[in-house]
Amino acid sequence: MSAGFAMAALHNQQLCLKVIFSEQVNFTTARARCEAFDNGRLFVSDTVDKLNLLRQIHDAVMNGSRFNLYVGMNDIVTEDEFYWEDGRLVTEEEKKLLFQPGQPDNYRGKEDCVMFLSHVHKLNDCGCSLRLGYVCEQHSEVSD
Ligand SMILES: [Ca+2]
Ligand SMILES: [Ca+2]
């Protein structure tokens, strides 16, 4: 595991996460930063349990501050066709469970990236040029 990653166990799964808020960057930079770690990518936060875990880690490291964080999902290629960073299409069920009610709304036609809203621990689609913190994971599986 690279420096700064925290290991967490969720059911039978080991997660290796790093929340970065010391810099606020756009989506492209956040993604590149995560991919620079061994087996790194933006966090595929595809269950409610993972969002709750992210909230716990966020609250533990933020010391009362709040930062919205880029996670590993976007609809950059085709509007309203969201993909996880592992290449999997986001299902309608996942959207319903993980997004804040009323989201994703592609507000002003310009929201193709996704952030973790730290105050409600749900997702919201947002502009990719917003400067935010981000959360990376180190995954063990081979992705292609
Ligand atoms: Ca969009
Ligand atoms: Ca939105």
Image (cartoon, rainbow, N blue to C red):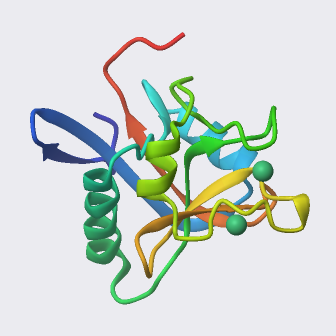
Measuring 47% from the left and 14% from the top, which residue is drawn there? 143
State the image coordinates of residue 100 (x, y, percent, origin top left): 52, 69
Answer left or right for 27 relative to 52. right
Quadrant in the rendering for residue 111: bottom right
Relative to the observer, which residue lies in front, 6 or 116? Answer: 116
Task: Tell me: residue 112, above or below residue 109.
Answer: above
Q: Is residue 28 left or right of residue 63?
A: right
Residue 19 in percent (x, y) is at 42, 58
Q: Residue at x 44, y 82 (%)?
A: 119
- Residue farthest bottom in this picture: 64
The residue at the point 51 percent across, 36 percent down is: 91
Residue at 28 percent of width and 65 percent of height: 57
Who is closer to the viewer here, 12 or 131?
Answer: 12
Q: Where 116 falls versus 113 (above or below)?
A: below
Residue 28 in the image, given as x and y percentages of width and height: 74, 44
Quadrant of the drawing holding the C terminus: top right
Q: Is residue 113 left or right of residue 43?
A: right
Q: Is residue 58 left or right of residue 85?
A: left
Nearer the observer, 3 or 105: 105
Q: Which quarter shows the N terminus?
A: top left
Give the total number of marks visible in the rendering.
0
The x, y position of residue 49, in whole percent, is 25, 54
Q: Is residue 63 above or below residue 52?
A: below
Comparing 58 with 78, the one in front is 78
- Occupied quadrant, residue 83: top right
| Residue 52 in which image quadrant | bottom left
As drawn, 43 above or below 39: below
